[in-house]
Structures are given as structure tokens and as C-alpha cells.
Amino acid sequence: MSDPTSFLLPADRIPKAWYNLNADIGEPIPPPLHPATRQPAGPDDFAAIFPENLIMQEVTTERWVEIPEPIREVYALWRPTPLLRAVRLERALQTPARIYYKYEGVSPGGSHKPNTAVAQAYYNKVAGTKRLATETGAGQWGSSLALACSLFEMECTVYMVRVSFEQKPYRKLMMHTWGAEVFASPSDHTEFGRKMREIDPDCPGSLGIAISEAIEDTVTSKDTKYSLGSVLNHVLLHQSVIGLEALEQMEMAGAEPDVIIGCVGGGSNFAGLAFPFVERKIAGKASYRVLAVEPTACASITKGDLRYDFGDTAGMTPLMMMKTLGHDFMPPPIHAGGLRYHGMAPMVSHAHKLGLIEATALAQSHVFESAVKFARCEGIVPAPESAHAVAAAMDEAIAAREAGQKKNILFGLSGHGMMDLASYERFLNGELQDV
Ligand SMILES: *Cc1c(COP(=O)(O)O)cnc(C)c1O
């Protein structure tokens, strides 16, 4: 053993405040619009679905938002998360590059999502909410919110995209274990769900449809609020703990990253890792490349348009200025269920427009091939979503080898894939096709 390969922070280094890129981005983000009037939506327009404390976080331009102690106490169950150097992978790739990754798979939910689930459950609890309703794609968000609700003694209802509900029974069982109720979406539990099932009884569902169902449930029920696992400003804010810890850990490693990489579904784990670094880039303290990686099958940044669009399929949410494939886009059932969303976080879309970040799209087979290689070198089986970041980091390391170039690569390993082994099985059996 020569150089250290793991960079661990003590418990008292859990960040005390979240970082908000909205304070530094310069050009303001276009405001959300009311779905009916198409006028800028104010805090009141969100009051039916979110508590006031989270609405205030959604619009704040404060740079630092203090993290309440009860949230830090829960974070301490798994934070600070480790930052590791993938030396065995570097050797296998024969690259002069150094590959670092920030690992969020150590949370009880197995991904970064509990970082915001815990915060949202806490703020709802203090605002008097009794039940949270939400949607989930592959089940990571639903299980994270179920976990958070159980920790703060609240009820939780999850609308789970039908194709995942059927392919991933274990996540449903995690949600049941943490005390949540789970419906396959489209469901018979809401008017919108019944309508979708009438049109197509075999509808595989989508995040957009499930969001519509969760919102309908929320606005037609008492003491119930809605919770979203990505896309919104306050979600990206909560995820900044990833990057704030990583900044400190890269300093421990004595390495300034040249490129920072994250996978993007709605954009939250990527923003959480990258934005604290983007702040340094804006301040002129560093010049990183910051790379968002999406699947070719649902490529909202690289193939979508920057325009106002709804966050859901039914058109019930406010319109957001974002990179979008259209709210009625029905993504093919790829295995990275968490990346099957038609839009992209407005703040990530805006940072892309301003040239602060770049994006690339990768095909599923290349992604799984890279993930298997990573697992065989480093042990951890990446979540299929995170595998997109793994593949892009490996592509960077190979390019560095070919150019004979030393560089530091930092990527976000947003979760583990132990609940997604069925998709690995399909890949290993040669059954996985690119769409
Ligand atoms: C949900 C999920 C994603 C995608 O969501 P973002 O908001 O883009 O981060 C990525 N990785 C994992 C492991 C996930 O569970």
C-alpha cells in the first residue's frame, strides 16, 4: 500500500449549511409559470402541495441555508459518506489519470435520495403535515421517502411506475417494511390513473403519470402534502452536502479535480456533487470541466429543447423553464429507471445554458459493460443510473491514457445496484438491447 485510497471525514464534519447555486449563478433563472394563467407563479401557487418552509427554500437566493440539528442527527446515520480512489480500476485501464468517486450508496436507501427525503419529511413534520404522497420510478425515491417518513413518524403513499413495480418487487417490500403504502401507476386510486388505464390497460407508466397521480391525491386529501425527489431547487439544495463533503475530501487527497462527472435523471445527485465546485469555478478559483451524463434513450439535455414545460404528464404542475423532451414523452423501459424523466432540473438546465456545465449521452450496453468492469475491480456494483457516471469516468480515463495525460477525475457514485441485479443478469446473458 503506497498512497491512501479512502478519504473519510469524522462525524463532526457533516456540513452545517447547504449551498445554494442560485446565489451565485448571475443571470436569474426564469420563474415558474402558473399552469392555467401562464403568469409567473408565486409562493401561493405552490401552497396546496408544499409546506411554506420548503416553498421559501425553493425561491431563496441566500448562499447558505442552515441545516436544522434534527436533520444532521439523521444524516449522522450514514454521513459523511466516503470518497474513494479507484486505484485498481486505474491499473486495469492502464491510465495515468487518477479516478476518485464519492459514494452515496452507504445510506439506508442505498442512494443519495435520503439526503433530501429526510429534509423534506422534517420540514413537513414541523409544518403539521400528516401524510406525504409521491411518485417513484425504479423505487429509490419511494423507498427513501418511506424511510424518512418512518424516522419522523409520518404516513407515506407512493405511486410507483408500473414497469418498475413489476420488475423490482424488492423496493416495494422495502417501502412496506418502512411502513408506506404503494400503488402501481397508473393506478385505479386516482381519476387520472383510471383515465390512463382506460386508454391503455397495458400502460407501463412513466414518472410524469405517477407525479400527476401523487399530486391529485395530495390536492384532494386533508393534511397531505406532495414530495418530489429531484428537479426542484430545494431538492438540489439538500443534495449539496455531497459536494461540500467532496470538496473537503479532495483537499485531503491533495488533488484538484480536472473533471467532475455525475449521472442525470432529474439532475439532483449531479447538482449536489457539482454545484459546490461550480461555485469555485464562477469565483475564478478553479477551471473544472463539469459533465452531466444521461442515457441516449432519454436524453433531455443533449436532445431536448430549452423551453417552458410541465413537470408531469397531466399538466397539473407549474411550467418550468427547462431542457425537456416534452411532458408527453414516453421513455422506453430502460433499466436505469431513475433516469426515465422527460425534463431536467431548471437550475441544471440554466447552468448548461450559461456554459458552466456540459452534457453527454451514453448507450445502455456501453454503460453496463463499464459497470461490470468497475465492479470486478472495485467491488461495488453500481446502480444502473450511477453506472452512466462510471462509464463516462472510464471513458475520460481511457482518453487520458491515449493522450498520455495526467488528470484527476471525480465522479459521483450515486447508489449501489444490489436491488438491480436482474438488469445485470440480462446484460450478462446478452439480452440487453440499446434503444
Ligand atoms: C434517482 C437516482 C438517480 C437520478 O436522479 P437525479 O435526481 O438525477 O440524481 C441517479 N442515481 C441513483 C442511484 C438514483 O437512485
Image (cartoon, rainbow, N blue to C red):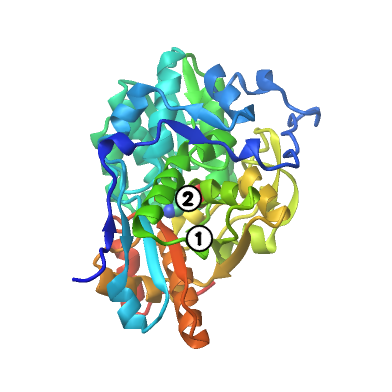
Q: Around disc 1, counting alpha carbons within 10 Å, would you say few (fewer than 14), some (14 to 19), or many (20 or more)?
A: many
Identify the residue shown where x is 63% and y is 23%.
Answer: 46
User: For the C terminus, which image quadrant?
Assistant: bottom right
* Residue at (50, 55) in percent of width and height: 339
| Residue 194 x/y as whole percent | 54, 37
Q: Nearer the viewer, residue 160 or 367?
A: 367
Q: CA distance from mark 2 to mark 1?
A: 8 Å
The answer to whether marks 2 and 1 mark residues whose Cβ atoms lie closer than 8 Å is yes
Query: Which quadrant of the structure image shows residue 416?
Result: bottom left
Along the line of sight, the residue nearer the viewer: 32 or 241: 241
Residue for point 27% across, 58% down: 6
Callout 1 amino acid: Ile
Q: Nearer the viewer, residue 33 or 256?
A: 256
Q: Secondary structure at mark 1?
A: strand
The residue that label 2 is drawn on is 273
On the rendered structure, is 61 left or right of 321? left
Q: Give the labeled residue for mark 1.
A: 260
> What x and y, as percent, mark residue 93?
37, 82
Q: Mark 2 belongs to which amino acid?
A: Leu
Position of the N terminus, as image quadrant, is bottom left
Which of pointers 2 and 1 lies earlier in the amino acid sequence? Answer: 1
